[in-house]
Image (cartoon, coloured by chain):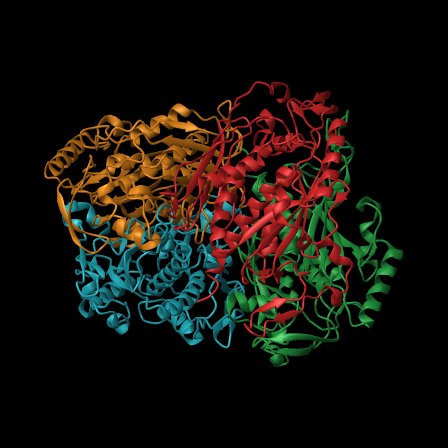
Chain colours: A cyan, B orange, C red, D green
Amino acid sequence: MSNTFGNILRLTTYGESHGVAVGGILDGMPSGYKIDIAAIQAALDRRRPGQSVITTSRREADRVEILSGLMDGVTTGTPIAFEVRNADHHSSDYDNMAHTFRPSHADYTYTARYGIRDHRGGGRSSARETLARVAAGAIAAQALAEHGIDIYAYTRRVGDIALTEQYTAYDPALIESNIVRCPDKSTAERMIALIEQVKAEGDTIGGVVECVIKGCPAGLGDPVFGKLHAMLGAAMLGINAAKGFDYGMGFDGVGLRGSEAMDPFEVDPATGRVSFAANHSGGIQGGISNGADIYFSVAFKPVATLLREVATINDSGESVTLRARGRHDPCVVSRAVPIVEAMAALTILDAMLGARCARR
Amino acid sequence: MSNTFGNILRLTTYGESHGVAVGGILDGMPSGYKIDIAAIQAALDRRRPGQSVITTSRREADRVEILSGLMDGVTTGTPIAFEVRNADHHSSDYDNMAHTFRPSHADYTYTARYGIRDHRGGGRSSARETLARVAAGAIAAQALAEHGIDIYAYTRRVGDIALTEQYTAYDPALIESNIVRCPDKSTAERMIALIEQVKAEGDTIGGVVECVIKGCPAGLGDPVFGKLHAMLGAAMLGINAAKGFDYGMGFDGVGLRGSEAMDPFEVDPATGRVSFAANHSGGIQGGISNGADIYFSVAFKPVATLLREVATINDSGESVTLRARGRHDPCVVSRAVPIVEAMAALTILDAMLGARCARR
Amino acid sequence: MSNTFGNILRLTTYGESHGVAVGGILDGMPSGYKIDIAAIQAALDRRRPGQSVITTSRREADRVEILSGLMDGVTTGTPIAFEVRNADHHSSDYDNMAHTFRPSHADYTYTARYGIRDHRGGGRSSARETLARVAAGAIAAQALAEHGIDIYAYTRRVGDIALTEQYTAYDPALIESNIVRCPDKSTAERMIALIEQVKAEGDTIGGVVECVIKGCPAGLGDPVFGKLHAMLGAAMLGINAAKGFDYGMGFDGVGLRGSEAMDPFEVDPATGRVSFAANHSGGIQGGISNGADIYFSVAFKPVATLLREVATINDSGESVTLRARGRHDPCVVSRAVPIVEAMAALTILDAMLGARCARR
Amino acid sequence: MSNTFGNILRLTTYGESHGVAVGGILDGMPSGYKIDIAAIQAALDRRRPGQSVITTSRREADRVEILSGLMDGVTTGTPIAFEVRNADHHSSDYDNMAHTFRPSHADYTYTARYGIRDHRGGGRSSARETLARVAAGAIAAQALAEHGIDIYAYTRRVGDIALTEQYTAYDPALIESNIVRCPDKSTAERMIALIEQVKAEGDTIGGVVECVIKGCPAGLGDPVFGKLHAMLGAAMLGINAAKGFDYGMGFDGVGLRGSEAMDPFEVDPATGRVSFAANHSGGIQGGISNGADIYFSVAFKPVATLLREVATINDSGESVTLRARGRHDPCVVSRAVPIVEAMAALTILDAMLGARCARR
């Protein structure tokens, strides 16, 4: 529903790009988890623009403040509210945007829906809203870590430059070793070169983020409408600029035969523990996790804000020429990485809580 | 949540493959819509197995009965309950399955989640559950038709045989002209030949269904977590065997430049009506419909039930050999077409109701 | 929301008085509970009209059928659908009601809301809908019994004849010993005499049902909007003809001083177990159960259907005279007893599931 | 659910008494309503302690700040976040409370539920949380006023001193003319004298707040579980110290005959407009508003914090003596008045939005 995500663990966010603050309330967090606020801040810093030459150079301090729900750094079971104040709020820089609809943005559709929109910096449709998701996700991720669940994402593809191997071939420790967050050095270099070229042309380019969830127990996911991958899909498709989601063998699996796509069981003779000889399923079968790694991809479009003049219309239907102000990302995928991780963490923790109610 | 789909318009389904009945309650349906029960039955008949040589020959009568919520064929605003009785319920044919986990099925994961599972014909994880979605979707579709909204889906790809043009190139009137539900005759023939070959090999093959929504007004969709494409994505990923979802330019758009992917506005000088010179957005911008056609794709895996012997394990961890009973589809996509349409109809009608609350 | 009750355990009901069937889906029921269908039927029989001279003599067979969610009598975690077919559906007996608004009924308000209403026997506003609540409540009650939680209700007051002692003074074993379901013989006799007198006058009378929940563990209830007593209150106020709800010292506590109303702690020196020297709180403090008995009262109005001529209007605003057809209860409280119990069971089991997510 | 109230219009609150801030997010507010922030502040000031000799003298500045959702004072359809910073947060004054359970408070039950509690000033169970409700309610009330709906509440009873007439006998303009918020001067004086006497004794006393909703259109309320009075009841019972709720004739109606309790229709011959010759129903029939005044009562217990020594236990089960710090209200009802109004406003506006989806 609207600005709330999740069933038992529920994140509600608020805030416009140039309003007073962006933040949220994470409700349904069980008591007893130790939360490190510095880790939340670190997650926000990864999402922050201006981290590198390939991201926008807009400076945002983005200091998170926790307002409730913790005592001595431990969750109490009450809602955790947090906020990030906007440094440059109520800017008049955007007055020229009040009546202009940027093409392939949300300006026209917000107006169609609400009859009114906050035009300053994109208002609510700005990616700045994702700050709140990253903060909440960083809380959830710390709880998951206590249960041995680890989530990481990275850039799989930028334009037509893509990693060629399965996720298992890449070392997550290398993700932060380059500014495009790709765990393969030479691919990363080619991606960065492409982004710089696109940027020089005043253009933008899309990409794919892949996410891996390790240590997830079997049994998570409601098997009909609330299938675990359906919840992950909704979470990812709710991220700005997302155009597609697939998991396991995904779209590529369409070309396989059933006999090729099968994941045979394996039983450890010593422990009796069940595992799988392959993982086309992506760790989810019938909508429920099976204990294997969960992995999925999210496609992001080339963002619509070009660093050049664009012809468009205003809200009177007249033709106008638009030139974007400020700095904008030529490619969002590197900054989308922590957002994907955050939404995955919220989804998995919510599913873990739901699984507690599945049996007598 | 679990067995309920939707926010204002909510479908709750029930039923196991070999239980007494499969059905559902569609709640939140506004009063005043004329509903043709024959059209519901026709939708169910399209989903039914045994329609052609390329689908399973299991005979299912699948007669829908409406139990409430209509008076003289018109919705009254009260919940519409419906059911389809199972002809062959409580079958003992499946006794051998009670302790066997079929590979790449939901047997193991259901047991991991619930400690127990109804093993007869897949129980709740059977695609027979989708009957209820199709019935409810047929009700929603009739309401949408009164508002000038038309939804159709078709088979875009089977294995590596795919349509090559955009959806606009195909005539929806041709979808039902062949058993694979592909609107291009020669592609359909090649798809059918492939499915027959795969079937002869005792194997299965995946596919892609594409769906188009025409006539959708601008302004539908909650712009943050409830983005219209996120809701459509969750709806589609909740369908059995779905592995991926994308909309508009989708995964292919990743390779485009922002300047190529833009959808310029057009204004009709006579009427002042806004339209778009291109539709990479897929009719949705910032999570809200823009009035253009909505189109999206759903990837379906090759189903896991092979018509040959398969090695697997039982719930004691012992190796066993399994041979599927009964008849099973070598490719699910043609039968998935009406399910995709149904879930789309439910999603769009729900979003239309939500949009009524967006403004003063 | 509308026709769904509960958060994690959710009952959705459907059905009109003279439609095809009345029933529901109980979703979110954990797997592993043994359910006795005969006990569900017995609960329905207690709710049934025509049990005694003081209730309506309408004959309703009311045989419940379980359609899903059980295997060998044990819950599987999938939704439990159930239905009761209506014997006398689509009756034309009510044609004269199609355009008449009965005073103090829901006829006018349904029409105001929906523009249409099913007028046959009250349609959806008929107390027959509560069948579905009683069936679902009987399932929940069986699960609660496995956890040592026992719920019972009885008639505390009819008109001005009321029990004078606290609930602790009465033996629940006596509730079913008389037709008015009052656990005090002489009070019951006076209540029955009053109801018979009222009935002879063609009139009706109100009453109060009290409910007691024993064995409820401490810790149930969400402490802000989802306070346990707020959920119980919503459950009870949702029953037809309910006009009020209070718990613990309730409205009478308004006249007490804080020093009189206090519930001092007691600690068993042997076990260290905490109990309470008094129970003005009604087993709930700060919205969370404290382990003491929960008790509350529900006020029911004198039902509006009199067995005499009544002046009213039709939907053209013209004055008409109305004479009720069929048989109607002069006092609903004895039949409300099992409905109150059912709603309490659903509320408590839902709260138990919620409590599983409160802690790490 | 937990810290969220409402279906389409949803308020989520956060904050502990001595945390950083108390606040909330009001989501689902339609665009286009003009909101006066001074009116929100005025509502908070009415709730504030220290307004008079009969309320606690704790000084709280309680300045509300709006963080999002408005542009030029008009709602944009995006979530409205607001907060009130706590002046005296993280106080060590309460260290002695860390291990003590106050009798008839939420200390023991929070610990039972969460294993941990924020003991500072009652933490989340403090009535300070209601600040957020009052702020959100003041926003909703301004929207309702644009639709001609007016809500007011007042003190009907303190201890055994009560107003004797129906609400229609009292002028709401007089409510704020005295510190106990009772619209009858002489009754108010007697109430105040009683409260002062109780205060002098170091004791507390309960009371009843009555609320009236005028101008509510017919057709609001979901007729089964979401009956309008069930939603109002849940809203009121969720307020701290509430012990009971009734509406219309309420508990007193139990003693009436059906023939006495009837609300005959009246039709204005000139306009054809329907009204009612009586209003025992309290403006709601079958769970749906009928256009007449809605009125209901809420019982509040004598608060448990006495201004004298109290024997209790600590979390080791040992007997301890407790003396309340700071200042506390001897009677909460006058301060409960704006909270009741706020929750009523949120409930009615939510129901108005729901009614928009009831018909084609």
Q: Is residue A173 above or below residue A298?
A: below
Would residue C145 appear left or right of D62 to someone viewing this image?
Answer: left
Q: Position of residue A291 (x, y in %)?
A: 27, 59
Query: Percent position (x, y) of residue B270?
Result: 45, 34
Asked if residue A191 is positioned above or below residue B25 in the image, the reply reads below
D278 relative to B334 in the view: left or right? right
Q: Nearer the viewer, residue C9 or C199?
A: C199
Q: Position of residue C160 (x, y in %)?
A: 77, 42
The answer to whether D331 appears left or right of B285 in the picture is right
Q: Furthest-right residue in view? A: D186
The answer to whether residue A167 is seen in the rendering is yes
Q: In terms of depth relative to the viewer, which is nearer, B10 or C251?
A: C251
**Whole-percent x and y of residue B48?**
28, 31
- Relative placement, left or right, of C138 versus D326 is left
Seen from the viewer's position, the closer of residues C189 and D89 is C189
Residue B217 visible in the picture = no
In front here: C219 or B212? C219
| Number of numbered discs visible in the structure rendering | 0
